[in-house]
Image: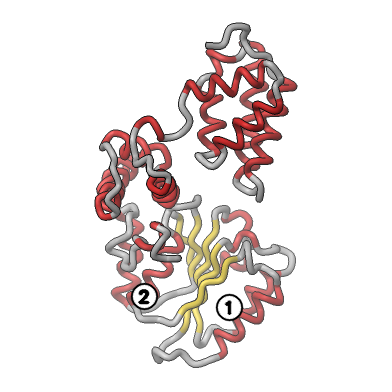
Amino acid sequence: MNDFLWVEKYRPTTIEETILPKSLKDVFAKIIEKGEVPNMLFTGTAGLGKTTVAKAICKELDLDYIVINGSEEGNIDTLRGKIRQFASSVSLQGGYKVVILDEADYLNPQSTQPALRAFIEEFSNNCRFILTCNFKNRIIEPLHSRCGVYEFNTSKKDMVDLVGQFFKRFTSILDDEDIEYDNKAAADLVMKYAPDWRRVLNEGQRNAISGLGVHANNIGVSSNTVISLAKYLKDKNFKSMRRWVVDNVDMDTNSIFRGLYDNMNELVEAQSIPQLVLILADYQYKDAFVADHELNVVACMTEIMAQVQFKGNLS
């Protein structure tokens, strides 16, 4: 399975291979140089390389490590059992071990996170902990104080260089996979999702699997497609709207929300634009957490259908 998914197949295995702001990359390079891993908390939005960096540090220092996903294995008993079993045994490499706790902000702050604090203290002699999270304000202060906090933020100045690096990486992957593409479409895809590099690879692979390649006519949802959706919403044609969502939701839910937002002046009466923006923002936020993206998009379109007034002549 790992050989199939580009995000795993092409995941960097060293800090040098990662695409990060230079200042942050230098910090991790010094950790490798010293050979000492502190307890760390990596924070930043999805797809920036937090888990990749954690794994790369362990691999470069030849440390035993385990990855536990907080959103999937966050039950306190499961967490306790996995950590205790791993941390209690002696490392085959002779050094300390590392627990990488991915998406730690999904852990219950009243029960599981305090328990994690106790684990960090209990196994401090032979185990280090690297926590990753999207929202650091969801991590309790006692965990903050026991970890060095590393912000995976990207400034506008850094972004130009990082986009250039990732464009080269992305087109190299497309070449390796023998996928047809044009440079502008590849650049547009990188720019669209930067700095979420994981999303770029996932979208590129999705297009590759479908046989479409990476070309301008299949990056995101086109204006003509959005107009078709708007006509169904205007006519309150729920059946056709739902069919449209089913046909397009696997493309990219953000593109659906963004498509309506980018074209709202041409599609929606002026007095309804504020309401449309509020609805889109609400459901786009929810989309990051829901299990069923199709249902979330249909619910969004249903609310727009009920509350937003579209212009009379849509073409």
Disc 1 crowd rating (10 Å Cα; few below 14, some 14-19, many 20+) is some
Disc 2 crowd rating (10 Å Cα; few below 14, some 14-19, many 20+) is some
The residue at 51%/82% (across/down) is 127
Q: Which is more toward the observer, 190 or 63?
A: 190
The residue at 64%/36% (across/down) is 297
Q: Does dot 2 land on a helix, a strand or a loop?
A: helix
Left or right relative to 283: residue 205 = left
Three-letter amino acid code of the residue under disc 2: Lys
With respect to residue 44, does 253 lie above or below? above
Residue 63 in sight here: yes
Residue 135 bears which disc, if any? none
Q: x, y percentage for residue 231?
A: 61, 17
From the image, which quarter does the N terminus lie in? bottom left
Q: Does dot 1 land on a helix, a strand or a loop?
A: helix
> Which mark's residue is nearer the viewer, 2 or 1?
2
Three-letter amino acid code of the residue under disc 1: Ile
Q: Residue furthest top?
A: 312
Q: x, y percentage for residue 224?
A: 48, 21
Q: Which residue is mark 1?
A: 120
Left or right relative to 225: residue 20 = left
Q: x, y percentage for residue 23?
A: 32, 56
Residue 59 bears which disc, if any? 2
Q: Which is more toward the observer, 116 or 62?
A: 62
